[in-house]
Image (spheres, rainbow, N blue to C red):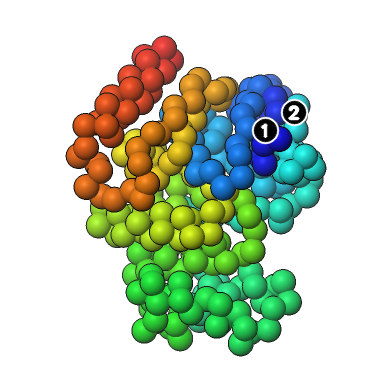
Amino acid sequence: MDYLSIQGVSKQFDAGGSAVTAIQDVSFDIPRGAFVSILGPSGCGKSTLFNIIAGLLPPTAGDVRLEDTSVIGHAGQVGYMLQKDLLLPWRTIEDNITLGQTLRGIPRRRARAAAAPLIHRCGLTSFEKKKPHQLSGGMRQRAALLRTLLTGKDVLLLDEPFGALDAITRLQLQMTLIDVWQETRKTILFVTHDVEEALLLSDEIIVLTERPGRVRARLPVTLPRPRTPDMLASPELMQLKSQLMSLLLREVTAS
């Protein structure tokens, strides 16, 4: 049985008296510990799908099951990171990172000790006592990523977490995410508009259609692990990129 199962999920919204369908009959299964990226045109319903999986938004039809238990209407079952870091401005970086742990009742000292190795790995050791406004956007996003990784949830939804970062910072965080994922084997769903990012990170890529979003294709990423930046120039990745770009271009042309 698959760990996370999206079963015939559709969502309609009322737009001034007329129904707008954001996603339609979306179905896919994800095994435990997989890293799966979702690509698709802007407005195809990726964030709507994530909000449904997170239990924040009820579907019009269908179900989402985690270990064969429905998560519909049950928020807090997964970790969720958005493109905006959403750090609490009155808390230090260290206390923002450990927020999920302290909310679960873990003593502050123990939470900080558990977070320390990841804080060091992400180059934030000298900034633990700073407030968010004292850090660059890239550093704040590192803190937000660590907060999500330390929620204690086995499923993580990452909605374009690196989309607003410069190329160098984005690559650094991609490598950090790969390293931590390989150690923890969390189940990750990752939304991105960056084809190379999806290929570098993922075990599989799901391509959605224009709105209403439906599953157009599923592309296994067969590159060996561990993944490294030099793979971006490899013939294997370039071939996969060509396949993926063809899928996306056909979708754009069809619309």
| Residue extending farthest top | 254
Helix or strand or loop: what does disc 1 sit on?
A: strand
Location of residue 28 by image quarter:
top right
Q: Within 10 angstroms of label 2, few (less than 14), some, or many (20 or more) residues?
A: some
Query: Would you place residue 253 above or below residue 208 in this image?
Result: above
Q: How many marks?
A: 2
> Disc 1 versus disc 2: distance between alpha carbons?
8 Å
Q: Which circle's residue, 1 or 2, is located before the other in the chain? A: 1
Residue positioned 61% across, 39% down in the render: 31
On-image quarter of the N terminus: top right
Residue positioned 34% across, 70% down in the render: 136
Which residue lies under the disc numbered 1? 6
Work out whether residue 4 or residue 222 is closer to the camera in this orientation and state it: 222
| Residue extending farthest front | 224
Which residue lies under the disc numbered 2? 62
Residue type of the residue flagged with mark 1: Ile
Marks 1 and 2 in Cβ contact (< 8 Å): yes
Q: Residue 92: horizontal and vertical position, in percent? A: 50, 81
Residue positioned 35% across, 56% down in the render: 175
Q: Within 10 angstroms of label 1, few (less than 14), some, or many (20 or more) residues?
A: many
Horizontal side of 1 relative to 99 (left or right) equals right
Residue positioned 70% across, 25% down in the render: 8
